[in-house]
Structure formats: C-alpha cells, structure tokens
Amino acid sequence: MGTVDDYLNELDPADRGVVARVYEIAREEAPDAEQGTGYGMPALVYRGKPLVSVKRTQKHIGIYPFSPDAVSAVADAVRAVPNTGLDKGTIRFQPTDPLPDDLVRALILARKQQIEG
C-alpha cells in the first residue's frame, strides 16, 4: 500500500475529509511525523514508530494508534460520541459522526508521549 496521501486520493470524497482531518490533527501534534506504514497500512510514523493510521472499512472508519494504552486513555470520551466503538487497539466511528478534534488530539498526544518514552 502507498503513502497516506496516496490513500487519501483513493477515498470517496464523502469519506476523504473526515479521514484527512484525523491525519491533519496528527501532523499538527507531531510535525516531524513522516508518511510510511504500520502493520501494512498507510500511517504517519514518528521517531521510527507508527503513530496513527486511519482506514475506511466497509462498515466504519477506524483509527489505529498502534497502542491499546493510547485507546484506553481516551476510551471514556469515545464512548460519549454517538455511533462509535472501541476495541483493544482501535477506535471505530461513522463518517456522519466524526470524533471531536480535541478527542483525536488527546489520542495522538497519548501515542506520541508513549513513543517518546
């Protein structure tokens, strides 16, 4: 699979803005992050480790911060958003009910801090 930009260009316009917004927030919080892959998915990579991947699946949009601890850090806030779901290392939401920017920012910061050790 290609870069984040390649992936965004492949998305349906209805989903592209929502997925791009998550990556935009991640780039704001980790401006040194580079495009790469994590577990075979297009991702932003920070200090050599995957920071976040966002993928459109058949049923939802998934955010993968490559860290169950980062997901746990924002789990209560995610549960307050309509039509969301949580799994060990994934947050799922519908493009019609995107995650609030501050929640995405908190997720990215949790993962970034984890990478920084």
Image (cartoon, grey):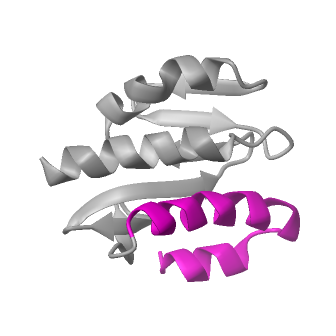
Q: Residue at x 58, y 38 (%)?
A: 103
Rendering coords of residue 110 (x, y %): 35, 41
Above or below 13: residue 66: above
Please provide percent x and percent y for residue 87: 48, 25
Query: In the rendered view, would you say 18 is above or below 31?
Result: above
Residue closer to the observer: 20 or 90: 20
The magenta span reads 1-30
Residue 64 showing in the rendered view: no
Within the image, what quadrant is residue 24 found in?
bottom right
The residue most toward the left is 117
Q: Is residue 25 magenta?
A: yes
Position in image of residue 30 (x %, y %): 38, 65
Q: Residue at x 42, y 31 (%)?
A: 71
Which quarter of the figure has residue 48? bottom left
> Nearest the camera: 103 or 69?
103
Which of these two is toward me, 116 or 58?
Answer: 116
The residue under the point 48% across, 61% down is 26
From the image, give the main secondary structure of the stretch colored magenta: helix
